[in-house]
Image (spheres, grey):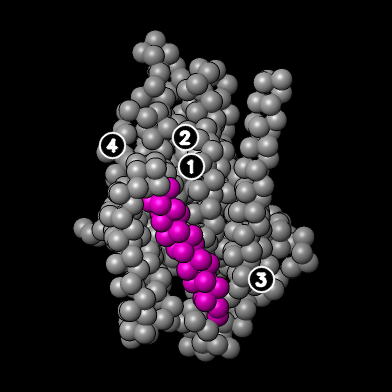
Amino acid sequence: MEMKAFTSFTTTKNLLIAACLIVILFLGNYLRSYSYDTVPHPGETADEYAFAWAGLSMIQDGFSTSWSYVDEGYPEVWDEKINVDAIYDKDPVRPAFRMVKPWFDKPPLFSLLIGGFSYLKGVREPIAAGTAIIRRPMLRVAVLTTLLLFWLAYRLYDKKVALISTLLYSIIPTFVISSRLALSENAIIPVFLLALILMDYYLKSRKIKYVYFASVLAAIALLMKMSGVVVLVSILTILFLNSDKKVKIKNLITSFLIGISGLVVFAIYGWIVDWQTFKQVFLTQSNLFYGASSEVFFSAVVHSKITANKFFTDGWVTLSWISAFMIGFSEWKKNKGTTLIITALFSYFVIFLFFGSESYGWYRFPFFPFLAILLAKLMVKLYDQQNYFVALALFLLPFGTIVHKLIGVFGFQNYVGVFRFFIFSYFGLFFVSNYFDKRAVFVRKAMLIAMFVFLLVLSVKMIIFYNYDNWFFVT
């Protein structure tokens, strides 16, 4: 009888968690779909067009034609104003696209995914590959990313952290808006997460097959973009830190050879199409450095950059980095889940610096799922410990930036009285609850939950606030 009751309880609990996850997935998909084709503005990140056009031409012609920042090494170069999304109607002085053929700026896999989707939707010319079409598959990729994020957080921590991680990833404005873009980083993220899940399976079972599967994913990531090498770097680092000396070298070499095969496939593709051009373009691209300055780390933590010229200051992101520091310093080597997450985060930070990626917001995207997990972990920790004062201090970070965006400094003057009343009540309840031992825990935890729910509502409101017109005011 007791066993049946336990089984029933467990099943009910799992069903509740599944229901919560489904609600989060629908909420996240709704928020990403809202104004997805106009925010960020079409043409603001022209790399989206580069991927789509390259894939579309590859399907139709057998080789890629697209635009490039750097035309050195290309045999065919010309300027063309392709009025996709009517970008030249809105900005007549916009420079023409510097078109090249055959295009080797990036590995071909992500281009094939976006171009292939566009082709299936009837697109045959570059001018028809607008954001309404090329961003649509990214909405589905984001759902997959959210599911993998839940899976990874659940394996490394628990269901509570997993659910909160997915919720944060689905409502934090920077995370939501950035995931709409048809850029290779958004496709590398789910590959990265799945590779880490497989590595966790390896660490808990010591079955080498999981390392091999993860290494295949590393090869796939490299076929999307060179910065996808982070997947291989993370795998090798995890192996180095967790393998026995006798098998360490063998596993490292095998994993490296499987992972680097993605680069080999890219080279074979270049050899088939035009080896001389591929070689010259590859060398030129490998020498590019996009401008990581001396304050690159500060910029990554404070400025929630989404595109090349839009600084979307988001207190949630700063709070997430603070969470990464707090959890990383307190649990490094003490908690295996934290060790794996911090290893992945640090591995990508090395890649971020190596490629000199500070100038472009999309190079920050692979940080986001790990920051969501670490923020969720900190929130659960503060809740369990009833850390009332730290929670309030951290609450003010996203609260401040969201309120500033929604109503501005002068608009907030109308709510100063309400804000002061909240602060007074917050501390008043804290001190009063000390006289009621049995209810103190309930009151404090209820206050923490209320603050979190309030921030969630504000975040949803902020995402919906940014339609096509309001996005102009993002600096």
Q: Is residue 227 visible?
A: no
Mark number displayed over residue 157: 2
Q: In the visual, does 330 lie left or right of 453?
A: left
Q: CA distance from mark 1 to mark 2?
A: 6 Å
- The amino acid on which the numbered mark 4 sits, given as a three-letter code, is Ser
The x, y position of residue 258, in whole percent, is 53, 29
Q: Which residue is mark 1?
A: 161
The x, y position of residue 133, in whole percent, is 68, 67
Q: Which residue is mark 3?
A: 132
Please report whichever mark, 1 or 4, sits nearer to the chain's N-terminal start: 1
The span shown in magenta is 441-468
Q: Give neighbour class at mark 3: few <14, some 14-19, many 20+ (Cα, 10 Å).
A: some
Please report whichever mark, 3 or 1, sits nearer to the chain's N-terminal start: 3
The x, y position of residue 373, in whole percent, is 45, 45
Q: CA distance from mark 2 to mark 4?
A: 15 Å
CB atoms of marks 3 and 2 within 8 Å: no
Give the mark toward the camera: 3 or 2: 2
